Amino acid sequence: MVFSSLIAAPRVSAQVHVADQRALDAAVRQHVSAVDQDRETVRLFLQRGDVKAIAGKYGIDMRRAETAVATMDATELASVAAQARQANQALAGGASTVTISTTTIIIGLLVLILLIVLLR
């Protein structure tokens, strides 16, 4: 009888969570925050006057580039934001002239943004 009650009784197994809900929520918030920061970095980079001037000189549509940033996924955005940070550092320090290498970085970044949208 004891044996039959053991077989008939449903097995109750406790779920073991590696992380509690607060830790999961914090991880999600951190990821969203990082994506938002990357998007803002790229958006601010595209609003720079020198970036707009270079884009205009080479016929790059800034509105399209800005729209593209809004549609990028986290991986694409992280890559573009890293390049935008690099270009911002190259342009920082009050330099009044833009060097050829910085111009190349800017053009490359703008083209990358547009290619990401075109290849979707």
Image (cartoon, rainbow, N blue to C red):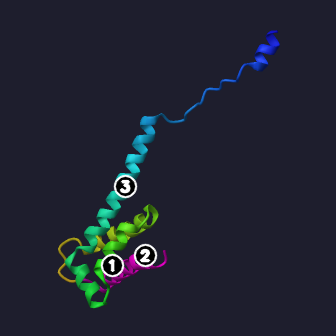
User: Mark 3 highlights which residue?
Assistant: 34
Q: Earlier in the sequence, mark 1 or mark 3?
A: 3
Residue 98, located in which quarter of the rendered image?
A: bottom left
User: Mark 2 highlights which residue?
Assistant: 117
Residue 85 position, x and y percent, is 32, 67
Is 12 on the left or on the right of 38, as rendered? right
User: Magenta region's main secondary structure?
Assistant: helix
| Along the viewing direction, whichever of 26 and 87 lies nearer the viewer | 26
Q: Name the residue type under label 2.
A: Val
User: Mark 1 highlights which residue?
Assistant: 64
* Quarter of the image where the N terminus is located: top right
Residue at x 17% of width, y 74% of height:
94
Q: Name the residue type under label 3.
A: Ala
Image marks 1 and 2: residues in contact by CB distance under 8 Å: yes
Q: Which residues are magenta?
A: 98-120
Q: Name the residue type under label 1.
A: Arg
Disc ID at residue 119:
none
Residue 44 position, x and y percent, is 25, 68
SS state under label 3 = helix
Q: Residues within 10 Å of mark 2 (few under 14, many from 20)?
A: some
Residue 47 position, x and y percent, is 23, 73
Residue 74 position, x and y percent, is 43, 61
The vertical placement of 74 against 29, above or below, is below
Mark 2 to mark 3: distance in Å? Answer: 21 Å
Mark 1 to mark 3: distance in Å? Answer: 23 Å
Q: Earlier in the sequence, mark 2 or mark 3?
A: 3
